[in-house]
Amino acid sequence: MSRLQGVLLAVVFVLSAGSSGLFAWPRPALAQARADSFRKEFDEVCAKTADAMTLSTGELRTLVERSDRLVPLLQGLSEPERKVYAKRLLGCRNVYAFVLESRHEH
Amino acid sequence: MKLSYRSAAAATLLLAAGPGRAWTTEPPPDYGRVVLANFAPKAGMAPAQFDHWRHRARYTCRVCHVDLGFAMSPGATRVSATTNRAGFHCGSCHNGTARFAGKPVFGACGTRATPDDDSRCQRCHSRGDAAARRKDFEEFAAGLPRIGTARDVDWEKAEAKGAIHPADGVEGVSIPRRPIQMDKEVAIASRGWTNSVIFSHKKHAVWNGCEVCHPDIYPHTQGAARSSMLEISSGASCGACHGKVAFSLGECERCHLNPVR
């Protein structure tokens, strides 16, 4: 067995062991960090819906932008979590947009 | 008295013309009952039966319909044993560890393993025992103010009297926030012969926050939020809740109350 074959065999072994659950890939830790980061920003952005009427136009615009920036990060969440947070995020984003729109109309 | 005659005439006409269910009043133990049948029957289980009255004394509407992600239409949430086991939807509270008023909240149905699990599952996945439900409701509603010919619970008065204390969050799920300050009343002129509607943000926002209604149910700002009773009885606008869970559309004078009560 050549040295190259040995390396390839080792790579195949590591890949198959990882996918069969013999050891944990570092991905879950990364995914957890992404989820924690998402939730931290989500909590900050969506904590102000009850105050939406008293926020300035600039603050509302910033919150809409921050909400929109969170949308791609939903992909990093596991399925049940993604489904729930997608609905929650859309709900709070749309409240801020609604208040902005109502100000514009009046 | 004049208003009563008008209301009776309106109810009679619209009962004959429109979708009837929203105008009639089901017995309080059955009113607001939701059947969740997306997945359970395929797994050989009875659909889950959800009674709003069992929950609305404990939590505001906003907690479930915003924080827990429950849609406003039956079946649209697609809640499943998987989502519950992961700690979402019903599993946010029914997780076997949460407590309410010092008592443990039973866990949602997961993988059945023991006879005890079966009896736990049947608390929701049941065809329903109407007599038991009536008994449960009467025990629950004893001491709560009642209203209307159907003797439904007057939830607004119950909270005002301190008989119920709906929480506005679930620990670990909801974002801590201060109570909403929104007391703007909106007058909606009647197109016909009924009194005009005075819509109270204060009464609605305390249970719903902003997100339940805006912008999905009410995409318009003031001046454009007019809906016909036919639209409402079909489930649009006020009909998203009234006639399904909140008081029925037959109770005309509770909304058409101009001047402000």
Image: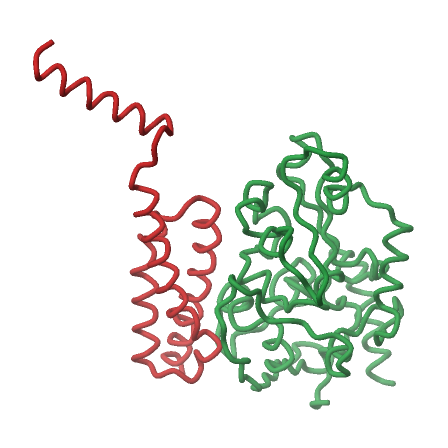
Chain colours: A red, B green
Q: Tell me residue B53's x, y (percent).
A: 76, 62
Q: Which of the 4 quarters of the picture holds residue B180?
A: bottom right
Identify the residue at image location x=86%, y=58%. B136
Left or right, residue B88 beside residue B163 = left
* Residue A78 horizontal/vertical position (percent): 42, 45
Q: How many marks?
A: 0
* For residue B249, above or below residue B75: below
The foreground one among B12 and B179 is B179
- B10 relative position to A2: left or right: right
Q: Nearer the viewer, residue A43 or B205?
A: A43
Q: Residue at x 66, y 47 (%)?
A: B108
Determine whether, in the image, residue A31 is placed left or right of residue B35.
Answer: left
* Place of residue B146 in the rendered image (x, y in percent of width and height, measured from the top left): 85, 74
Left or right of residue B87, residue B17 in this image: right
Give the quarter of the figure containing the C terminus of chain A. Answer: bottom left
Instruction: Return the residue found at the far top.
Output: A1
Residue drawn at 52 percent across, 75 percent down: B224
Depth check: A92 or A26 in front? Answer: A26
Return the x and y of residue B218 as percentages of the image width and height: 53, 68
Residue at 63%, 62% in the rendered image? B240
**Near-viewer residue (B153 or B4):** B153
Q: Is residue B215 above or below residue B157?
A: above
Furthest-left residue in view?
A3
**What is the quadrant of the N terminus of chain A in the image?**
top left
